[in-house]
């Protein structure tokens, strides 16, 4: 689709404004997602920022990436806000099961990891891996000096 | 052949690879480098680079560039849009809202700004306020799948109608097998109408609003992924686990200690479901 947000296309070099090369956080996101989608029963996934930007996506072609990203970001924000309002501690992970599969969501300051899995996926295995991934993503945020 | 060090000593200009270059080329490159140092970057180039950094998750660098760009060109909509995006990433929603509104003051039809305001309205629980933003975004930009996904999601929603306190409490918990450490037991209709909840009236209201929103958004997500209707959910917070069960008509939720495993918690909420003998 044409991009309705009107922001310019990214075309510039990969170094920071002062010319110092920095590791791309996006690369860490891609590696994190790639590890998760290799788990048995996981069909694919994406990482979306709270503003709905898809940082990386590994979903089969039939999945509507933009729509899923918008919904995942909205769901992630609601889970964050609910955890805070209800004093349940920071939101970490969630799963929602239906008759034909399960959606997993991991929350981190940089964004939400969303996985689409088969019905018979090992929930505990994916949850544990997702929890580790979320911790890694929190690490990238802290490394950058953000709290 | 003269070695690199010999070239330097002889005063021959070299390129980055240590190759000799002509004097004219050397002067041209030197001049270009010097002017590049003193010539301010255009706001457009700053925003373009900021957008790239945003795509790479380099929000701090992006924020610096956007601030610099907006100082020199405060009336460029895309700068304020990028500013709004970063405020959302940093969860600074009032500032994000102000920046999205600034975009609309410069470009009243900007679909991304409209979409951004719709999402903020949604997370504020302002469903009626959310709809016009989505409708306008799609009106001005029909090929906008993110906005359409949310528009379809909220199309059938009404503001959660929390039941009056007199209608609450018709379910007795005496016969329920409440697991140890269970709290925030709640039963609502999928439209948000509260049937029963533990806790104070204010806590009941917050629980009902949150659980209904989670149920609705998660249901829409599952449907978009082609997986069917939501049946069970597990939400892990740092201190508690929340378990959900639904048949499409009602939603049952309970919070359990964080140590409870997902499978065991789902069994517990299944028992509660049976005990309540729920018929939607």
Image (cartoon, coloured by chain):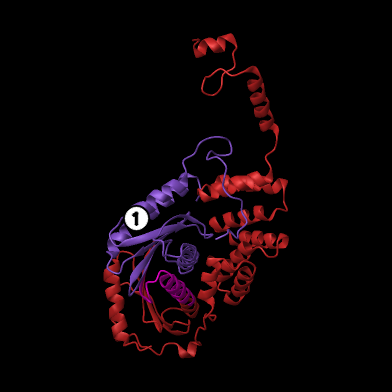
Q: Is residue B178 visible?
A: no
Q: Residues within 10 Å of mark 1 (few under 14, many from 20)?
A: many
Say left or right for B139 vs B269: right
Q: Nearer the viewer, residue B159 or A73?
A: A73
Question: Residue at label 1?
Answer: A36
Q: Quadrant of the C terminus of chain B?
A: bottom left
B219 in magenta: yes
B178 in magenta: no
Image: magenta residue range:
B209-236
Residue found at x 44% / y 82%:
B190
Q: Position of residue B8 (x, y in %)?
A: 56, 13
Q: Is residue A18 visible?
A: yes
Drawing shade for chain A: purple
Q: Chain of mark 1?
A: A
Residue found at x 51% / y 14%:
B4
Residue A145 in the image: above or below residue B22: below
Residue found at x 60% / y 70%:
B138
Q: Position of residue A44 (x, y in %)?
A: 37, 60
Residue found at x 34% / y 62%:
A43
Which of the 4 image quadrants contains residue A93? bottom left
Residue B249 in the image: above or below residue A70: below
Residue B55 in the image: above or below residue B234: above
Q: Nearer the viewer, residue B13 or A107?
A: B13
Q: Count of labels shown? A: 1
Q: Position of residue A49 (x, y in %)?
A: 50, 57
Q: Position of residue B61 (x, y in %)?
A: 56, 44
Q: Secondary structure at mark 1?
A: helix
Which of the 4 image quadrants contains residue B151? bottom right
Drawing shade for chain B: red
């Amino acid at each position: 689709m044409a991009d309705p947000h009107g922001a310019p296309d990214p075309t510039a070099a990969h170094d920071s404004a002062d010319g110092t090369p920095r590791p791309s956080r996006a690369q860490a996101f891609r590696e994190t997602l790639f590890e998760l989608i290799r788990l048995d029963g996981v069909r694919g996934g994406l990482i979306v920022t709270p503003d709905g930007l898809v940082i990386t996506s590994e979903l089969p072609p039939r999945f509507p990436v933009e729509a899923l990203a918008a919904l995942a970001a909205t769901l992630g924000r609601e889970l964050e806000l609910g955890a805070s309002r209800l004093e349940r501690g920071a939101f970490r992970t969630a799963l929602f099961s239906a008759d034909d599969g399960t959606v997993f969501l991991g929350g981190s300051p940089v964004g939400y990891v969303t996985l689409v899995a088969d019905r018979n996926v090992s929930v505990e295995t994916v949850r544990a891996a997702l929890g580790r991934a979320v911790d890694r993503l929190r690490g990238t945020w802290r490394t950058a000096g953000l709290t | 052949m003269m070695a690199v060090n010999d070239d330097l000593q002889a005063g021959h200009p070299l390129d980055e690879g240590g190759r000799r270059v002509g004097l004219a080329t050397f002067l041209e490159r030197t001049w270009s480098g010097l002017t590049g140092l003193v010539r301010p970057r255009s706001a457009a180039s700053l925003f373009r680079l900021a957008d790239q950094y945003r795509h790479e998750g380099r929000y701090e660098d992006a924020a610096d560039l956007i601030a610099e760009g907006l100082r020199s060109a405060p009336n460029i909509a895309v700068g304020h849009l990028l500013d709004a995006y970063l405020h959302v990433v940093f969860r600074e929603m009032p500032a994000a809202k102000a920046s999205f509104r600034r975009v609309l003051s410069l470009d009243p039809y900007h679909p991304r700004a409209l979409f951004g305001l719709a999402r903020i309205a949604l997370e504020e629980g302002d469903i009626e306020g959310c709809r016009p933003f989505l409708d306008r975004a799609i009106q001005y930009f029909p090929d906008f799948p993110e906005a359409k996904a949310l528009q379809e999601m909220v199309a059938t929603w009404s503001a959660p109608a929390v039941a009056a306190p007199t209608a609450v409490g018709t379910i007795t918990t005496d016969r329920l097998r409440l697991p140890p450490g269970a709290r925030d037991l709640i039963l609502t209709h999928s439209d948000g109408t509260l049937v029963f909840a533990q806790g104070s009236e204010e806590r009941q209201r917050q629980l009902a609003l949150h659980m209904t929103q989670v149920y609705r958004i998660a249901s829409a997500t599952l449907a978009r992924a082609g997986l069917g209707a939501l049946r069970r959910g597990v939400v892990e917070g740092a201190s508690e686990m929340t378990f959900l069960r639904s048949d499409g008509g009602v939603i049952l939720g309970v919070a359990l200690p964080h140590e409870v495993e997902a499978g065991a918690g789902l069994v517990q909420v299944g028992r509660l479901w049976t005990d309540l003998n729920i018929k939607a």
